[in-house]
Image (spheres, helix red, strand yellow):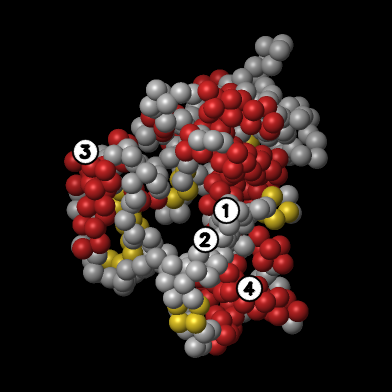
């Protein structure tokens, strides 16, 4: 739930294929977020707009750049109000986690988006106060985690958008626009089943599709034989008790002989997963290890964490590239990778040295890191780490100050 899958290009959200319908005081459908609300200017009946909002929040909270999703920059440019609202949702989640006495009870971002769709007239502060009040007054006797009902709906495989779900839904036609509202095209066709008309330009361009549910006998269907390897960047570490990570439900592989051919292995019991149950964790890790044993190709083990010293050197090398006239699209990351290796030849980083913390950027301003005190290096490290050009580029975008430089 709430995780963007790069292979199936889908993101599951609580409302499935039917966005909440809210009416204003006069009984008319509320099609845009009112001024002053957390969803100000957002087209509330437009699946593309809400998809953009949801994925932007996901990217902010996972510290991923927009360019990590092919074509997403175009959606953000078109639905600017939605993108801004997604940033606000991420900012709200971070704020709640910092101040709540029970951070584990802070609702997931997708539950906040869902609630905001049900109450689109509320401001950022209204939502923050409401959630804090619920968290602080919700006794320990309530054992169900926040968002339980939404998670249950999403576990049925309902996602945001998708070719199948386009049958019977359309796009909204608002009345006016402001500087923080998305523009709408004038050409429309009638939408089926009494839904609002569908923008002609939007037909077929929705990239967030409904994921196919793999359960029952389908979950045991063996993959095609071949020289499979895990795709670059795959995290093969074990799931950890009490640390929810939906990405563990999937392992994506590709043919060594034909990288364009992909295979996504999905954990069949993910719907009933309880991250606080040791038996569930054991079963999930056993299933993941089984796929690892059946994959003969390369395994992308998790890379070592970045130290503050490494981050400082990366920032300086990026600045040097910019000073030499290079731009975001022309920076030679291979050269930076080579220079990084040279910089750390023979360098000893001691146990207890500070690790680098990623930071997000909201409305052009770098936000504070998650931890007030930086985590520490647990073991002594000598020499340069093997960090390729693409790894350096992706890491650079996770640091707000470097991201703003680029």
Percent of width and height locating residue 277: 29, 39
Q: Which residue: 58% across, 52% down?
A: 370
Point out the frontmost of discs 2 and 4.
2
Q: Which residue is mark 3?
A: 216
Residue 375 image label:
2
Q: Residue furthest right?
A: 179
Residue 312 image label:
4
Secondary structure under badge 4? helix
The residue lying toward the viewer, choosing from 209 and 244, is 244
Residue 245 image label:
none
Task: Judge whether residue 235 can be spotted in this image.
Answer: yes
Residue 371 image label:
1
User: Of the residues under marks 3 and 2, which one precedes in the sequence?
Assistant: 3
Secondary structure under badge 2? loop
Work out how far the residue at label 3 is from the one at label 1, CA to CA, in angstroms: 42 Å
Secondary structure under badge 1? loop
Horizontal side, residue 192 vs residue 144: left or right: right
Q: Which residue: 55% across, 67% down?
A: 354
Q: Are marks 3 and 2 in contact (CB under 8 Å)?
A: no
Q: Are marks 1 and 2 in contact (CB under 8 Å)?
A: yes
Horizontal side, residue 121 vs residue 264: left or right: right
Point out the frontmost of discs 3 and 4.
4
Point out the frontmost of discs 3 and 2.
2
Q: Which residue: 26% across, 52% down?
A: 285
The image quadrant of residue 331 is bottom right
The residue lying toward the viewer, choosing from 315 and 394, is 315
The residue lying toward the viewer, choosing from 385 and 248, is 385
């Amino acid at each position: 739930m709430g995780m963007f899958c790069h292979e199936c290009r889908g993101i599951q959200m609580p409302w499935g294929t039917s966005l909440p319908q809210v009416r204003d005081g006069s009984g008319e459908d509320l099609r845009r977020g009112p001024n002053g609300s957390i969803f100000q200017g957002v087209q509330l009946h437009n699946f593309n707009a809400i998809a953009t909002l949801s994925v932007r929040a996901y990217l902010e909270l996972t510290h991923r750049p927009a360019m990590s999703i092919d074509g997403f920059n175009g959606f953000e440019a078109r639905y600017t109000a939605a993108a801004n609202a997604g940033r606000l949702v991420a900012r709200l989640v971070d704020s709640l986690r910092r101040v709540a006495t029970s951070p584990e009870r802070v609702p997931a971002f997708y539950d906040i988006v869902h609630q905001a769709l049900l109450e689109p007239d509320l401001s950022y502060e209204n939502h923050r106060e409401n959630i804090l009040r619920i968290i602080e007054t919700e006794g320990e006797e309530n054992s169900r985690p926040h968002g339980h009902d939404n998670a249950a709906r999403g576990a049925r495989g309902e996602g945001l958008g998708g070719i199948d779900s386009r049958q019977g839904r359309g796009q909204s036609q608002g009345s006016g626009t402001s500087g923080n509202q998305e523009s709408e095209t004038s050409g429309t066709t009638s939408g089926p089943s009494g839904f609002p008309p569908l923008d002609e330009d939007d037909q077929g361009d929705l990239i967030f599709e409904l994921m196919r549910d793999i359960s029952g006998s389908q979950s045991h269907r063996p993959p095609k034989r071949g020289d499979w390897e895990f795709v670059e960047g795959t995290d093969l570490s074990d799931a950890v008790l009490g640390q929810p990570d939906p990405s563990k439900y999937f392992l994506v592989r590709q043919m060594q002989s034909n990288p364009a051919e992909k295979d996504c292995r999905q954990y069949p019991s993910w719907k009933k997963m309880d991250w606080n149950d040791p038996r569930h964790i054991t079963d999930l890790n056993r299933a993941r290890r089984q796929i690892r044993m059946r994959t003969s190709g390369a395994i992308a083990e998790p890379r070592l964490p970045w130290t503050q010293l490494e981050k400082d050197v990366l920032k300086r090398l990026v600045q040097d590239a910019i000073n030499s006239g290079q731009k975001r699209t022309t920076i030679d990351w291979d050269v930076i990778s080579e220079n990084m290796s040279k910089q750390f030849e023979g360098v000893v980083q001691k146990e207890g040295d500070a690790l680098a913390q990623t930071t997000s950027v909201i409305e052009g301003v770098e936000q504070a890191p998650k931890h007030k005190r930086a985590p520490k290096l647990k073991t002594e490290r000598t020499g340069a780490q093997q960090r390729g050009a693409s790894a350096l580029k992706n890491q650079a975008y996770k640091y707000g100050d470097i991201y703003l430089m680029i």
